[in-house]
Amino acid sequence: MHFDSFSDFLAMGGYAPYVWSAYGISFAALLWLMVSSLNTKRRQTAEIKNKIAREKRIKEAEKLENTL
C-alpha cells in the first residue's frame, strides 16, 4: 500500500483505530510475556540456589553428626 504523506499513513485509509489498537495490544502482550518470563526465570534461579545451599547445609550437618 502506498501513502502520499505521513498523516495518510497514520490514518491507515480510515482504519487507524483498528490498525493501531491491534499493534498496541500486540506490543503490550509481547512486553507482558517478556516481563513475565524474566520474573519467572529470576524466581526459579533463586529457588534453585536456595535448594543447593540447603542441600549443602544438610550434608555439612551430617558430617558433623558423624564426627560426634
Image (tube, grey):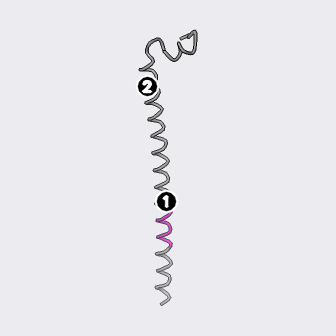
Q: Residues within 10 Å of mark 2 (few under 14, many from 20)?
A: few
Question: In the figure, 63 relative to 35: above or below?
Answer: below
Main SS of the magenta part reads: helix
Residue 46 — which label? Answer: 1
> What secondary structure is found at the residue carrying circle 1?
helix
Amino acid type shown at disc 2 = Ala
Q: Nearer the viewer, residue 64 or 13?
A: 13
**Which residue is at a point 45% across and 18% down the rendered structure image?**
16
- State the residue position of label 2: 22
Residue 13: % across, % down: 47, 11
Residue at the farthest bottom position: 68
**Which residue is at a point 49% across and 84% down the rendered structure image?**
64
Is 36 one of the magenta-colored residues?
no
Residue 66: % across, % down: 47, 86
Residue 8 — which label? Answer: none
**Which residue is at a point 49% across and 15% down the rendered structure image?**
11
Residue at the farthest left position: 18
**Which residue is at a point 43% across and 25% down the rendered structure image?**
21
> What secondary structure is found at the residue carrying circle 2?
helix
Magenta residues, start to end: 45-56
